[in-house]
Structures are given as C-alpha cells and as structure tokens.
Amino acid sequence: MDSYNIMFIILAVMIVLSSFATVLTKSVLRAAAYLFFALLGVAGMYFLLGYTFLGSVQVMVYCGGIVVLYVFAILLTRGAKDKLSENTRSKIFASALLSLAGFGAFVYAIFKANLLTEMLSTPEALAEPSEGAVISINEIGQHMLSTDVNGYLLPFEAVSVLLLACIVAALVIARKR
C-alpha cells in the first residue's frame, strides 16, 4: 500500500465521518463546523488527484466562503440556539428509505456505465495523473470567463448574485429581530 492509497483512505474516512456528524448533530452551528471539515476533505481529494486549481477553489470558495456565510447567517438570525426537531420513527423510516433509494440509484448508475469493471480491469486508471492530463490554469480561466458555447460566465455571475442575495436576506432578517 503506497502513500496515495493511505492518504485516500484517511481523506475518505474524514469525509464520511464529517458528513455523518453534519447530518446527525442537533446543533446547527456544529453542523456548519462539520460541513467545513467534509468540504476540506473533498479539497484534499482534489489535491491528491493532482487538480491543484480545483482544490484551491474548493478551499477558498466552499470552505472559506460558503461555510463562513452559513455561520454568519446562523449567528445573525440567532440560529446558534436553535435545535433541530426530534426524530420520530416515521422520520427515521422515511429517511432510511430515501437513503437506500438514493444508494440504489447510485449503484445502478455505476453498473450501467460499466465504471466498476473498467476500474478493476485497468489499475493504471487509479495511478497519479500524467502531465498531459492536467489542464492549465490559463485554459480554465478562458473557459470560466468566456461567453462561448463552452463558457461559464453566466453561471459564475449567477452564483455571485445568489450569494449577494443570501447576505442581504440574512441582514434583513437580523435587523427585524
């Protein structure tokens, strides 16, 4: 077992445990903290795969921006004292049923696309990416800010407007109290 596999296992365990803690905790502020660690683990996965730009964007935008925005929204609306509703048997049953249905759809998609057989038949698919497979930051920037068919300028601006609306809404709610 080499260092890539060990680091993958560590990050995978961190993501899974943080995700479970995010869902199972009763405090909203703790859920935001656990979400931070889950997103940080995903950024670690990006770094492990060699996608340094995507990993740094994950850390800056999601870990730095979105989680801080959640924490401010929670604290501005006095959500830190809010507790989640009690779990009843019907809620637990419905959530377990929906989780199993989602997992079944995931497994079906994996087998339908033959991803599992391809990964097991070619072990070099899990190896470190080659230099030719890594996209340059200049190329990512050109696609991100272009208005062509493959451009992402409109979704990029839509997300920024959405985040601005969230901040304004949090301030309006906080002022009313």
Image (cartoon, rainbow, N blue to C red):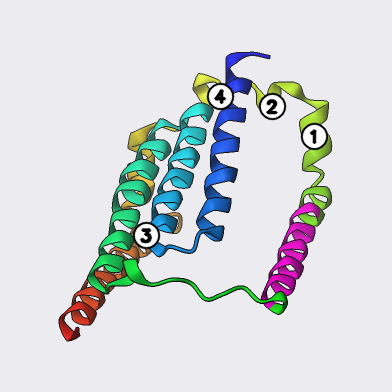
The answer for how far apart the CA atoms under marks 3 and 1 are is 42 Å
| Residue at mark 2 to residue at mark 3: CA–CA distance | 39 Å
> N-terminal of the two: label 1 or label 4?
4
User: Which residue of the protein is positioned furthest toward the left in this rendering?
Assistant: 175
Residue 127 to residue 91: above or below: above
Task: Please give the residue where the numbered disc 3 appears in the rendered image.
Answer: 29
Residue 105 in magenta stretch: yes
Callout count: 4
- Identify which residue is drawn at 80% across, 39% down: 116
Q: Residue at x 68, y 70 (%)?
A: 95
Is 88 drawn above or below residue 65 in the view shown?
Answer: below
Element type at mark 2: helix
Instruction: Name the residue tied to disc 4.
Output: 7
Residue 74 lies, in percent from the top left, at 31, 67
Which badge, 1 or 2, is on the more N-terminal residue? 1
Q: Amino acid at mark 4?
A: Met
Instruction: Provide the residue designation for mark 1.
Output: 118
Q: CA distance from mark 1 to mark 2?
A: 9 Å
Quadrant where the image shows the C terminus? bottom left
In the image, taking residue 176 as reference, residue 120 lies left or right, namely right
Please tell me whether mark 1 sits on a helix, a strand or a loop.
helix
